[in-house]
Image (cartoon, grey):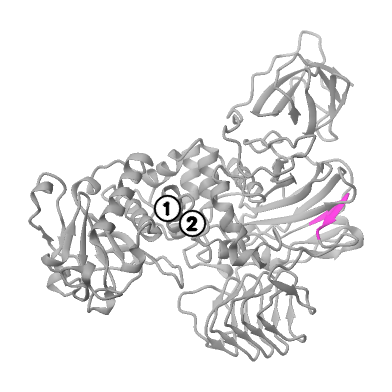
Amino acid sequence: MSTRKRTRRLLLASVLAMVLGAALSIGLPKAFADAKTVYIPASWQSTGEVPWAQNRTKESANFILLWGEKSGTTPTSAPSPYNFNPDNILSQLETLYSYYVNTMKFTPEAGALAQHKIVVIVTQTWNREALNAWATGGSAEGRIGVINIAPAAAAPGSWGLAHELGHVFQNLAWLGKSGLGFTHASAGTFWEASAEFMSMQVYPNGGAGDLTRFLRTENLAYSSSRHHYGAWMLIQYLVDKNGGIGIFNRMWNEARNTEHPLETYKRLAGLSQEQFNQQMAEYAQKQVTYDYSNRSSFMPFINNMYGGQFIRAYNGIAVDAVNQAAGHYAVPDALAPSDYGYNKIKLVPSTSGGTIRLHFKGHVNSAAGSGWSYGFVGVRNGTPRYGPVYTSADSQISFQTQAGEEVYLVVVGAPSTNVHKYGFLDGYTKNYRYPYEFGISGGVPSGYEPGYVKPTPVGGRWHSNGGGWVSNSANVSASAYVGPRAAVYGNSTVSENARIEGLAWVNSGATVRGNAVVKDNALIQGGANLSGNVVVGGDAEMGIACSSGTYLLFTTNRNCDGRAGETDINPAYQRFTDAEVAVTGGDTPTPNPTTAPTTPPTTAPTTPPTTAPTTAPTTAPTTAPTTAPPTTAPPSGAPCSATLAVTGTWQGGFQGEVTITAGTAPVNGWTVSWPLASGQGVSQSWGANVTTSGSTATASNAAWNGSLTAGGRTTFGFIGTGAASTPQLSCTAS
């Protein structure tokens, strides 16, 4: 029996094998005689694997419940915790089934799904200890869906039933279809994220996955097993981006068994690696404010995690100052983004409404196919404004801020050649990271500005040694170090010379003492007792006593063996010099300057609203065309021509793309002008220097795109305010 396993404690996916056996047909009540059949592997009963009995079963149209001896033949009257209501469980399951089939249309009701009833084993009711799982879902013998669910997990409104039935549907979407299905080892996280996403469709206000782990591990690879229950936000982005849930359903029904789920999406969407990487940066930009169509449903869960305490103290990571006087900063190596993980870095403009200029430079590792995609986000009154996406490993870029905005740089680890297929437990030391540095002028990373004031430490205090968050109920010695973004939660104890660094956090009930070091994205669970010279880092979790060794990798069976530390596939590198990341002037072009986010920003109002909007617009903006707009050749003898295409619209604004085409002779510089309609303006541009005067907009070439060969073309983009229009443009050469 193939299952996906969900537990409250460890939150892991697993595959269990059961002995295959012949089919056993059960006599059905008359109401179901012409409907689906019941198929139960004969070995379950003959070997004692699932010692079910006919008088401990109950059926509905699409399900059959099997329960154990401890609940007797009337489980509603059984003693606690073995009592449950079979009718209620079946009613919940039928409602969920109808939603996945008829409302969500996840997969056609055909094949195994249409032929056999789904078997539901009520666990923790049997004399057999192996049948004590909390909740799992999957399939058996390649032909039937199977759910294991404990009575307490199947209470009315059960999230667990929605999640595990989601796993059943995921299995049955491809069973019996040769070459299809997410069976590659790299797909494990997507299985769990998808089941959470499916549950959220049924119960939009009922949960939002394990966001606690996800929001402290955003830099890890998307497929990391450390945060698979919180990784549904990328799915939400894909659904919003592609006009609805159909793309998610297609991924599950059309996946090839050799593919990473993101490869499946890239293929179905018809994207090149470059285009795909740009979309992943758009996703990371949206993560600054969680700008999704269902935002109002899940934000309460984010805002109230751990009582709104350390998880929400900061939005993003802190960077290291290589040379603050020179404006030279670097991402901490351990927190550099892995494949489709990302960093959010808050920037503070030197002047309100000023221009931030940044020289981005990545450390290229040819073995990793290193790549990055990155861009700016401005946020005012909760409303995001997105800059274009860049993908060069060495680029000078800028962002014109608006008064009153918070500004973020987002950087995604985006390999340039392919999606790496890491196994489900191939974590920190086995995943490539993509380190980078940057020079900046016109602003500084948050924390380095004059007069910086830390946020209010809700529910805790900032530790005197290191400045990290410490719960009011924690016992942390002054001699112990808690770094600026690290956290010590609950009634845990950190003493002597222990160090908590990076984004590491110590959970309630843990003890860290001696010279122990906890760093990077490590999590120390309640009950752990770390001492001596032990080091726990990377993406490791530790919940045991340990006093020696270095542990950098998440694993399901962590022990304390004094190891020297797992070998990291990422090579060492030298910091760039100040000159190598210096901001020297003009912007460097992105390879495709027109690919700003295709879900355009909502332009901030000139009069800020009194309350921040809590939901995304109900009408999605139109998306950019997949092909370049047609251009008009310059009139005979004209030095150049220009055309304007509207690539996105939303209430109060639009995004435009201008294509300049040289005439029969080369052009060494160009200027484009066009009339502005009543109420129109230009709030942001890229690829050109755009100014407005009265009712006229004028754009002159950037330093890098002024020279065009005869018949050559270039483009620039802008964000316009007001209603969209496509006026006649004039082009002159200089």
Residue at image location 69% in from the left, 33% down from the top: 594
Q: CA distance from mark 1 to mark 2?
A: 8 Å
Can residue 151 be seen in this snapshot? Answer: yes
Q: Which mark is residue 207?
A: 2
Q: Do tag 1 and tag 2 residues touch (Cβ < 8 Å)?
A: yes
Find residue 410 and report its horizontal and vertical position in percent.
70, 51
Find residue 616 and report its horizontal and vertical position in percent.
61, 40
Q: Which mark is residue 199?
A: 1
Could you tell me the amino acid type at mark 2? Gly
- In the picture as drawn, the residue positioned furthest to the top comes out as 636
Q: Secondary structure at mark 1?
A: helix
Residue at image location 78% in from the left, 33% down from the top: 685
Counting residues from the start of the chain, the first of labels 1 and 2 encountered is: 1
Can residue 390 be seen in this snapshot? Answer: no
Could you tell me the amino acid type at mark 1? Ser
Task: Choose between 584 and 40: the one closer to the eye.
Answer: 40
Q: Which residues are magenta?
A: 438-446
- Left or right of 298, for residue 72: left
